[in-house]
Image (cartoon, rainbow, N blue to C red):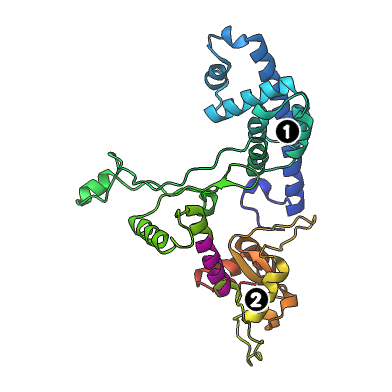
Amino acid sequence: MTTSLSPRFKGICDQDLLETLKRLVAKSGHLEAELLAHIAEVDARKLYLREACSSMFVYCTQVLHFAESAAYHRISAARVARRYPPVLERLKGGELHLAGITLLAPHLTPENHRELLARAKHRSKRQVEQVVAELGPKPAAPAKVRKLPVPSGSRTQPERPELARANPAPLESPFPTSARRPRPVPLGAERFKIQFTATKETHNKLCEIQALLRHQIPNGDLSLIFDKALDLLLEDVKRKRFGRTARPQAARETKNPPSRHIPASIRRDVVQRDGGRCRYTSPTGQLCGSRDFLEFHHVEPWARARRHAASEIVLMCRAHNQYEGERVFGREHMECCSSRNSPRGELG
């Protein structure tokens, strides 16, 4: 049993906590479906007018005190559910979420709604966006580079300390950086819009490479240039992280005593076998499959086995590598190791 972080859950084992959470989620699906059914009926009867509200949105935000985004999603989903009752059944069963219903709403018809609802079953918002993009592909985003104006209200570093105290820096976001990672927007089944702001140095490099590649890419197509650049970057990163190379060397004899460093030949074999994804599997058989923050995890901890073998090493994301370390050695031990800046990628 993991040490409880709240007195309320003291004495509750991990498995019971997970099962209770799943039951609560199941109940919340039924409650959400009932809520949408009532919103749809109030909306259809226009009862919000009796409550001195000019629209259902105003009623939801000012009387029911929903956040604006929650009101929008629920009203949209309620109106869709009124036309297509299977939506509520999917919501009750936890097969569909409000964001997915809102995304599908403009594309549902009497002929296709059952098929689309089935395609969106247990899909994330991003995956539903991909389904929607396949239904109505958007035109390709035009390639363009433009200089952004400096915001008039932008805050620069104050020259005087009293100004710094009067205008403190904003608080750090409680969410990890990975949660705010930019993502491509699907324009169709095989096309994505990618947009970012570049520095002057990056812009200069882009202009230079466009000029150098005129013989190969006469029109300076940015998508082709970035594709070539990403090929080179991928090869370089994989070579450094995973020992990937076009001419791999034979594995050298293990040192005595052995080093914590995993030989490149073993890293290559592990990455190829695991497909560059986290191989952590839950007790119920659910595979993590994340590509982010990958590390090499020793099935038999290095501190005990003192050996490297591809058959005894798997790829894991940092979170699951840390989790396995805590499961074997305990949280205090792992936190102590982290505070001493132990090398990442070899925690297991």
Tell me what residue is drawn at x 50 percent, y 72 percent.
340
Q: Secondary structure at mark 1?
A: helix
Sequence-first disc among 1 and 2: 1
Q: Is residue 258 magenta?
A: no
At label 1, the amino acid type is: Gly
Label 1: how many residues lie within 10 Å, few (<14), some (14-19) or many (20+)?
many
Q: For mark 1, what is the residue?
A: 29
Name the foreground residue: 282 vs 20.
282
Q: Position of residue 195 (x, y in %)?
A: 47, 47
Label 2: how many residues lie within 10 Å, few (<14), some (14-19) or many (20+)?
many
Whether residue 283 is situated above or below residue 264 in the rendered picture: above
Name the foreground residue: 28 vs 138.
138
Magenta region: 228-239
Q: Is residue 235 magenta?
A: yes
Tell me what residue is drawn at x 62 percent, y 42 percent.
188
At label 2, the amino acid type is: Arg
